[in-house]
Image: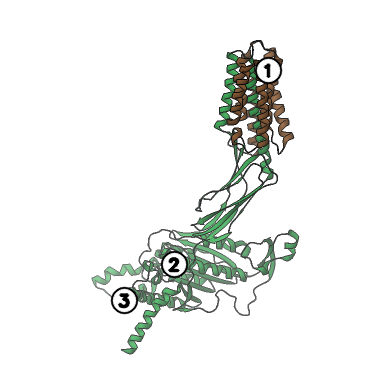
Amino acid sequence: MMGVLDTDDRLTAVLTGLATLGAVAVGFLVAGVSGILAGAALVVAWLLAPPVVVVALGQVLFAPLLPADASLATIALVEAPLAAILLVDLTDWRAPVGTLVAAVVALAAFVGLAVAGVVWLDRLWQTAALLIPVAAVVAYGLHRFTVVTVEVTDEF
Amino acid sequence: MEVTRRYWTLVVVGLFLACWGVVVAQPLALLGAAGVAAWLVARQFQFARAVGRVPATLDVSLTTAPRLMAEESAQLSVDAELARALPVTVAVTVTPPPGARGEPVTVTLGSGERAAVDHATLTWPVAGSFRVDDVTATISDDAGLFGQTAALDVGVDVAVDPRAPRDVHVGEGGDRIAAGFGEHEAGRPGGDVEPAEVREYVPGDAVRQIDWKSTARLDQPHVREFEGNTDRETLLFFDHRATMADGRPGTRKIDYARQLAVALVDQVGRSDDKLGYYAVGDGGTTALIDPGTRTETWRPVRTHLFEVEPTRGAPAASDPVRPTAARAASAHLDSDDSAFGRTLAPYFADRDAYRRRFDSRPLYRTVRNAEFGAATAVWTVIVTDDADRAALREAVTYARGESDQVTVFLTPTALFADGDVADLDAAYDRYSEFEAFRRELANLERVSAYEVGPADKLAAVLSVGRDRRRRRASA
């Protein structure tokens, strides 16, 4: 898991690069010059760091640029290129359909859960408190599935 | 499933985004945390799915020499193949068993690769039966987040035979015996032959044993074993007491005795005689295989012979006085009324003490306690050395009374003492004593006695005798 300068997967590198440029454009639309600077920082991250780090950095950089009362549509616009980076990175081009579907389902489930929390719960900490245990339970379930599949008896 | 430090780093990144979003009241950061969580779960799902496919698609085969000698090396080939390419890296590691020396060998199938092979050289220092079956598959994902190790149910058997001397001499007084031993008497039928079982061909089986119909039907070479309706029984007593360790590693008494005994067992197996087996250590009988047909006893006896090593025990006690000598002394002392005669008389009066003392000798005790069975013809074979001649003499005498024929194979201590025949003159003298003892045994009715040992050393010792005779003739 490396930056685009270290990867051999050219297709993923190009597509994540396009998504990163999309984030630059969105940054300009939402926050003007500051948005472009934030986007430029993302491009540097895209060159050096794994895509998931680019996405995390994007959240940190764009969050202060958005107004406090930003609409969900604005937030969705900012998130779209970052989500595209995640989806491209999760797609295995040797079996694109299965991996893309799994990525879309996972992203839709967790982002949907977060959006639902933001919309229906009073406070953001309640949404975080909902999101973290769900992720932990799903991860543990997958761990158990793997252990049972290969019949490893000394792991729990 | 194991997770890496990179995984935990990303978990921390997601938690940081969630906490930061809560602190600064920014939903965007919370959505970022959801995105990181989704990414981690999707990666884990992809890994779990790939791992689930590994058991059904991974085929690992191990290839090595099935049979070799101790201290020999053999190449172990590890061939790993996936029925379909998987988006994970599969590393198959084979760790040598404790009986082998060598580094573990790892075959790595990179993401998307389907076949790989690698080799390692293993050295087998110890004789015995081993199985190379410590095989694990370590699966890891391309992102370096997850790993899973699982044991694979695959292995290969290796039989390691002890190092065998190459110059085995079997003979009498330095002359090799020309004919095979243990063959049926002329005119005596070998008995009826009945099919016993069909089993898979293993290296070493004779081609004539192959059952072609079964081979064609089962698509693998199979041999048919036959069981003879013989009523001839061979009892093999194999001595592996401490004195059998005399000699250099690989050319000890026991190494020669073992090779002789294995050849004998093979000969008995070919003739379909019943075979029984007693192994004798310093503490007494260490192994007993009741007489049985070839299919019942041949393989276990052979296996034990290959694995047996000398025991560590105390040397034999001094020779007791033989009954005939005791009788003569006692008769003489009866007429001796002197203080000397009266003092010694009780020591020769109890003639039963002679046999009681031998009961503590492991070889004699084993022969005496052996079940000689009710076969019409019992052939007793004793493979031992001449270290405890009195006990051997009595054991042979006893076996003679229970058997139709007794054959003794002796490894002369003179040829193995101190691991070398440094002083050939002294060795010749000791060998002469041995030869006298061997003849004494061979002169017993229905008893044959042969020497077993290194041909080159024996030739060197005998050359001293020839020199002496030549010098005497010329003097």
Is residue B449 visible in the rendered image? The answer is no
Residue with the mark numbered 2: B253
Q: Position of residue B352 (x, y in %)?
A: 40, 67
State how far apart marks 1 and 3 are (Cα).
Answer: 132 Å
To the question of a shared chain for discs 1 and 2, the answer is no
In the figure, the green chain has which letter? Answer: B
Q: Position of residue B263 (x, y in %)?
A: 55, 69
Please identify the quarter of the rendering in which residue B316 is found: bottom left
In this image, A79 relative to B443: left or right? Answer: right
Determine the secondary structure under disc 3. helix
Amino acid type, callout 3: His
Q: Is residue B127 above or below residue A116?
A: below
- Farthest front residue? A33
Quick one: quadrant of the C terminus of chain A?
A: top right
User: Which color has been applied to chain A in this rendered view?
Assistant: brown
The crowding category of the residue bearing disc 2, from other C-alpha atoms within 10 Å (few below 14, some 14 to 19, many at least 20), is: many
Q: Is residue B259 left or right of residue B433?
A: right
User: Which of B75 and B141 lies nearest the eye of the viewer?
Assistant: B141
- Identify the residue under disc 1: A29
What residue would you read off at disc 3? B332
Q: Amino acid at mark 2?
A: Lys
Tell me which numbered mark, 3 or 2, is placed earlier along the sequence.
Answer: 2
Q: Residue furthest bottom?
A: B474
- Pick whichever, B393 or B151, lies toward us: B151
Mark 3: few/some/many CA within 10 Å (<14, 14-19, 20+): few
State how far apart marks 3 and 2 are (Cα): 42 Å
Q: Please tell me which residue is depicted at 69% across the width and 25% down the height of the picture.
A: A107
Label 2's element? helix
